[in-house]
Amino acid sequence: MSFCLLENDQKTFEYFQKYVELLDKHEETCLEIDNEIQASEISSHLRLNGYSENDISEKINWIQKNGKPFRDYLNTLKLAYVVWKCVGKEWKDISWEDFQRIRDRINTLKSVCLDAIF
């Protein structure tokens, strides 16, 4: 599967905002944003668990355990971005409530439709 259920948390909303802002301003590509977010998650994991920022084996361990599900999460955030743009919204219009509505609809459609996309 390439998508996941989106959580109802501030971090997910902030990542969504990052995609909308940077893609609307044409500052970065999706792949660049994905890589920045994943690198930040790995750094946070290392810091929170007492590993050195230079611990390559723990970075590889994180990627092996979390890489695919995390990219599914980022793919789902990009789908939320597509929905946002399809309804004609702009970066300055982002609200928590709008994001929650999109997240709820995507989560509802996951098992109905998204799980059938390969």
Image (tube, grey):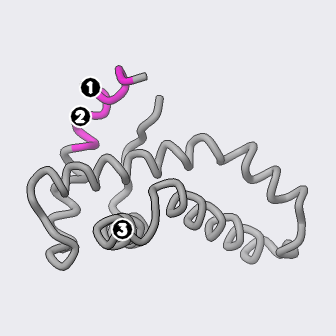
Relative to residue 31, is residue 13 depicted above or below?
A: below
**SS category of the residue bearing label 3:** loop
- The amino acid at mark 2 is Leu
**SS category of the residue bearing label 1:** loop
Residue underneath mark 1: 113
Quadrant where the image shows the C terminus: top left
Who is closer to the viewer here, 99 or 82?
Answer: 82
Residue underneath mark 2: 109
Give the mark nearer the N terminus: 3 vs 2.
3
**SS category of the residue bearing label 2:** helix
Q: CA distance from mark 1 to mark 3?
A: 30 Å
Please give left or right for residue 63 compared with residue 93 in the image: right
Give percent across and percent down for residue 2. Answer: 46, 34
Q: How many marks?
A: 3
Q: Are marks 1 and 3 in contact (CB under 8 Å)?
A: no
Q: Are marks 2 and 1 in contact (CB under 8 Å)?
A: yes
Identified at 72% across, 49% down, the residue is 63
Residue underneath mark 3: 26
Relative to residue 79, is residue 57 depicted above or below?
A: below
Identified at 19% across, 57% down, the residue is 84
**Which residues make up the magenta segment?**
106-117
Task: Give the mark toward the camera: 3 or 2.
Answer: 3
Confirm whether the magenta stretch covers residue 16: no
- The amino acid at mark 1 is Cys
Q: Are marks 3 and 2 in contact (CB under 8 Å)?
A: no
Please give left or right for residue 75 compared with residue 60 in the image: left
Relative to residue 59, is residue 44 depicted above or below?
A: below
Location of residue 28 (image quadrant): bottom left
Identified at 55% across, 65% down, the residue is 37
The chief SS type of the magenta part is helix
